Image (cartoon, rainbow, N blue to C red):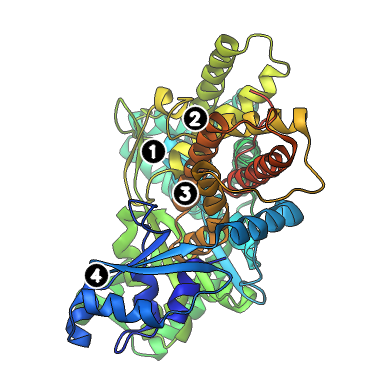
Amino acid sequence: MDYKKHIAEKLIVEGVSQEEIYSSIALPPNTEMGDYALPCFKFAKVMRKSPVMIAESLASTFVCDEHISDVSAINGYLNFKVNKLGLADRVLKSVLEQGEKYGSSTMGNGKTVCIDYSSVNIAKPFHIGHLSTTVLGGALYKLFKYLGYNTVGINHLGDYGTQFGKLICAYKRWGNKEEVEQGGIHAINELYVRFNNEATEEMEVEAREYFRLIESGDKEANEIFEWFKSLTLKYVQKIYDKLGVTFDSYAGERFYTDKMQPVIDELKEKNLLVESDGAQIVDLEPYGMAPCLILRSDGASLYATRDLAAALYRKNTYDFDKCLYVVAYQQNLHFKQFFKVLELMGKPWAKDMVHVAYGMVSLEDGAMSTRKGKVVWLEDVINKCVEKAHSVINEKNPNLENKEDIAEKVGVGAVIFGALYNNKIKDITFSYDKVLNFEGETGVYVQYTCARANSVIQKGGIPESYAIPQLSVAETEVIKALADFPSVLKDAAEKYEPCLISRFAVDLAQKFNKFYFDCKILTAEDGVKQFRLALTAATLQTLKNALGILGIKAPDKM
């Protein structure tokens, strides 16, 4: 039940839209005043009345119903009290009947969302900088699917460029097939780092020639490249499996090699291509942007060329309603240029292209450089979190069964939650101690709350029937949080912000733990006990649903 929407639909404020009313409704700091509040100060200018008079007038005409039990006007605020017994009845029934589907929706039925995320580079291991795009994209993929959308996850592989000529050059000079097979992606990366450290002009020329051979279809060069690619995908799949991240397409930059010329031809036909110092550009100066480079002076394509080809292919193949690009904010200009070029090409769907920008992730000791070999691998971060989780579990519950499995869930969950707790645009400094804090605003805290709730259910069971008693403040807060879950998911999808789900999970966990400590559950009198067990079961289910969308598993015990 979206109470804000319900209230907004029942209010008529002259000269003010329902959307503005909806966005103005807030949660009051003191819940004794009401469950929702509408400040009337911003309406004073439009209605030419004082906020106090507006609030009193609206209160006098508002008709209460089965959802809203009381309305009052206090000092320019319109305060609403929810019918808590009716709310508790509806919410518990919804959660317990819908189970894993609670919070899901049909809002996306008949619509398609393409999501471009992770975009692994062939022959390079994942470093911690790849964490955000991978888990943010993975969470959005699950979220849109949960809301009924046909969701297409795309791993736009970085499999095109002169670096592959450098790798083949390095492999031919210093490589050993058995050693590379055994060392996998890290052995390939060592060759890449060595090339950059020792490259001479002769080697650079040789590398460019090897890349030309790849492009021209040379058998040996392409066999080596495809081998590097298979080793890379085998390596990254293990990480994707750990993070619970999936894709429907691995069409990378190379896939669009034969699809760029039609784009270039269309740009020429529409008189959008301009020559500049031998290069071909689309002039975007009239729109306050630097030119979008389409072809270099030597005729080579660029990111923009391939992204334009990919956008046209995706629209023709999937007929998307939205196409999201989960890419760091450093690429803001690139996406503004690329989207503007589509608009100038007369593509009405250019407005449906969205750059979901995010901040950078680093460890507490600073940034990284792949080329110089100074990098923190994502697999090492995950493994270290799992090891630390294992040691914490050993300390807190040494007799716990299946400690390795639980440590895996906790450690991986900590990494994901740590990346998804803040607004996506914020830079993150990753701290092992912080993300594994059982008492903080962390995934571990939410998982521990799930284990606590599961323990109660294991002892008391889920009741077949229950009556709604007079609710305590702690019980009411849990019920209200549960009721908010569907609207939180909708809001997260509209804003492309999974952090709204992670924060919701922490908030619900905190409210449940207050209820757990304030109210007897297993030792309560029978009527109350059944209700509190139902409330515990509903909380556990909703927390699991929230964590599941983020890609995090909830252990039964901790």
| Amino acid at pointer 2 | Arg
Label located before the other in sequence (2 or 4): 4
Q: CA distance from mark 2 to mark 4?
A: 78 Å
Q: Position of residue 222 (x, y in %)?
A: 61, 49
Quick check: 237 left or right of 123? right
The residue that mark 2 highlights is 173
Mark in the foreground, 2 or 3: 3
Residue 252 showing in the rendered view: no
The residue that mark 4 highlights is 76
Question: Callout 2: helix, strand or loop?
Answer: helix
Label located before the other in sequence (4 or 3): 4
Quick check: 391 left or right of 303? right
Q: Position of residue 551 (x, y in %)?
A: 60, 44
In which quadrant of the rendered image does the C terminus lie?
top right
Residue 244 showing in the rendered view: yes
The residue that mark 3 highlights is 133
- Pointer 2 local density, CA inside 10 Å: few below 14, some 14–19, many at least 20: few
The residue that mark 1 highlights is 203
Picture mark count: 4
- Pointer 1 local density, CA inside 10 Å: few below 14, some 14–19, many at least 20: some
